[in-house]
Image: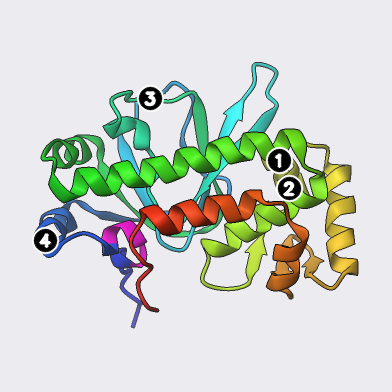
Amino acid sequence: MPVVPDPRRNHLLAALPEAEWNRWRPQLESVAMPLGQVLYESGVTLTHVYFPTTAIVSLLYVMENGASAEIAVVGNEGIVGVSLFMGGGSTPSRAVVQSAGQGFRMPAQAMKDEFNRAGPVLHLLLRYTQALITQMAQTAVCNRHHSLDQQLCRWLLLSLDRLEGHELVMTQELIANMLGVRREGVTEGALKLQGAHLIRYSRGRITVLDRPGLEQRTCECYAVVKKEYDRLLPARPAT
């Protein structure tokens, strides 16, 4: 029998009080989120918000010349499309699936209606948005002041927090686009981590072998972001 996707594998959906959950459930549509899928482009009015369950989405800022850099990642802890309920309707960033999986989406108007009801939903979404802003700010600081090796460790740890396993399917070219660096730099960084027995990298698959080792090797930025998410959002549901 096929496995029925569970929306409450997304921690924001799992945190909804029962009354709100019963109202939201009919509005949620299960969607596949294949690698590289663009959920929205820069400047385009959003038609849906997305709640990843097993996928990870990268929020990218794209320059006029086509170069891009990641400003945040969203996985099973959050929601893609905060500009919709923050009043903007669109955003200058692009949302791209960086790790394939599943998720759920809700129509834009339904999300606006829920946010405007105020109460627990409004406060939950605002706390999540504050955590997301912290991640964006820390990413900017990290990209300016820390080594590529440290940035790569931070990126791996943030991605790992949003997955249920220890393996990422990710090409070096995609990682380079995320970090806004040359592919050769990612290759060198990945080989260093593999040489230190922290990861195994083969044919687009990164397996984390030593998570504590990655945490020791990264900069303070990972811990700052994780602490803020843990402080602002409900404890993750037991698996």
Q: Quick one: SS at disc 4? A: helix
Residue 195 forms part of the magenta stretch: no
Residue ID at (69%, 71%):
211
Kindly report the distance in space between the C-alpha atoms of the residues bearing marks 4 and 2. 41 Å
Q: Which mark is residue 90?
A: 3
Residue ID at (32%, 25%):
89
Q: Which mark is residue 151?
A: 2
- Relative image position of residue 124 (x, y in whole percent): 27, 49
Range of residues picked out in magenta? 9-13
Alpha-carbon neighbours of circle 1 within 10 Å: few (<14), some, or many (≥20)? Answer: many
Q: Quick one: SS at disc 3? A: loop
Residue at numbered disc 1: 179
Mark 1 vs 2: CB contact within 8 A: yes
Specify which label sits upstream in the sequence, 3 or 1.
3
Residue at numbered disc 4: 22
Which is more toward the observer, 63 or 82?
A: 82
Specify which label sits upstream in the sequence, 1 or 2.
2
Is the magenta region chiefly helix, strand or loop?
Answer: helix
